[in-house]
Amino acid sequence: MNIARSVEIWVGLFVAAGFAAMLGLAMHVSNIPLFQTVDGYDVQLRFNNIGGLRERAPVTMSGVQIGRVKAIELDPRSFDAVVTVTIRRDFNEIPEDTGASIYTSGLLGEQYIALDPGGLDFFLEDGDEITLTQSALVLERLIGRFLTSMGDGGDDD
Amino acid sequence: MTDFFSRIGRSTLGTLARLGRASVFLWHALVGLPGLILRPGLVVAQIYSIGVLSLIIIVVSGTFVGAVLALQGYNTLVNFGAQDSLGVLVALSLLRELGPVVTALLFAGRAGSALTAEIGLMKTTEQLSSMEMMAVDPMRRVVAPRLLAGFISMPLLAAIFSFLGIMGAYVVGVGALGLDEGPFWGQMQSAVDFRDDVMNGVIKSLVFGFVASWIAVYEGFDAEPTSEGVSRATTRTVVHTSLAVLGLDFVLTALMFG
């Protein structure tokens, strides 16, 4: 029983197309964590409040992504949030007095960490800690503060 | 009154008997699977008629489902100024639900019904009995390759469906509606997880492929050997597969994402 060669070719094309589609979904649509271990060094950031920051959120400098959030923990003594980020190896000349803030992309978008470069000649290394941080803007607190200040203003009138 | 209860009893017993026959049937077919290693040609021929010939409808509907999803999603999201999330919306709906489910429903209509009709007609024209006469086991020769081919084809078809759906959404969203390309892919990539979304979709389509081809070959094998019986079996295949896929989809979703 010999099946026609064209049938075999079509089946081969079909299977190849199926796997290509899966590969496309894996590489282009999702950011596959298995093959995407960033080669880089870990730096710890201390925040008072991280808002809605999540693991694998981007870390940017001047808007360019240079790393990802690796882990988020709570310091049991100081109750600070300790965020470990992995920064790509190519960016190994980031000054030690670099500051970090948590911003939101768009009005309701994902939260990310933005690094603002400092001016020292010493550079961040694996295991270093950045303490010059600015916490996330939590909408409820902002509204609360706004309402209180409105109330104060009303009393003056 | 007794008539009423006896009718319920008869239909219950009938359903149970069919379930039992289907399970025994499945067992015999699964036993026939290892023998296929020696004759891969049988499976290749079935993948051609089940998978390759279903490609056109999968390609067309995948592209258009994605395109329509992008249009509808854009019209709603733009009200909230969240049109940048269009890529996320389309990718997640396709990968998690629409890809596996719509592919399975189309598969039931395109390939499942053909399988049932083919096997049913083999039974009606007594080809299956003549095979047995020649000491050829129809379970191994006819049923097992079709079961395996359906099981292999479904995830591939579903992957093609989802991929082309996202491409259709890209063409509509970025090409026609003028969204920016960066956030479309960027937000999609940060929101879609490989294991949680892509792999769970693949698992779903594996389950659907197994169930859909099981029902199709069983209904064909169990069909009454008349032309009316074959036509009824074909209808049953499409209806039962659709119901089974939709029901299983709920269960799987509850297990995976609940």
Image (cartoon, coloured by chain):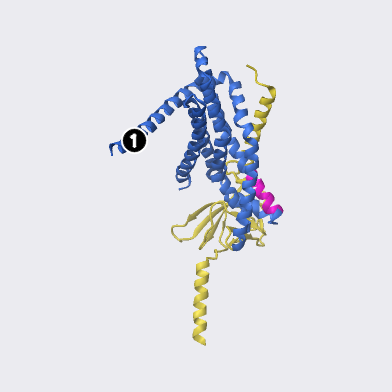
| Magenta-highlighted residues | B164-175
Give how far across and how far down residue B15 sits, in percent.
39, 33
In percent of the image, x 56 and y 61: which residue is there? Answer: A131
Relative placement, left or right, of A56 versus B14 is right
The colour chain A appears in is yellow
Residue lying furthest top:
B134
Image quarter where the N terminus of chain A lies is top right
Residue lying furthest bottom:
A157
Q: Is residue A106 above or below residue A15?
A: below
Q: Is residue A93 visible?
A: no
Helix, strand or loop: magenta stretch:
helix
Relative placement, left or right, of A119 versus B39 is right
Q: Nearer the viewer, residue A13 or A37?
A: A13
Q: Which residue is mark 1?
A: B7
Chain identifier, colour blue: B
In percent of the image, x 52 and y 82: which residue is there? Answer: A153
Q: Is residue B35 above or below residue A112?
A: above
Q: Is residue B118 above or below residue A108?
A: above
Instruction: Return the chain for callout 1.
Output: B
> Residue type at mark 1?
Arg
Near mark 1 (Cα within 10 A), the count class, few <14, some 14-19 or many ≥20, is: few
Q: Nearer the viewer, residue B237 or A105?
A: B237
Q: Nearer the viewer, residue A38 or B177?
A: B177
Q: Is residue B132 visible?
A: yes
Question: Per the image, is B104 magenta?
Answer: no
In percent of the image, x 59 and y 43: which residue is there? Answer: A32
Question: Per the image, is B171 magenta?
Answer: yes
> Could you say whether the residue bearing mark 1 is in a helix, strand or loop?
helix
Q: Is residue B165 above or below residue B140?
A: below
Give how far across and how far down residue B80 sits, in percent.
59, 63
Give how far across and how far down residue B94 sits, in percent.
58, 46
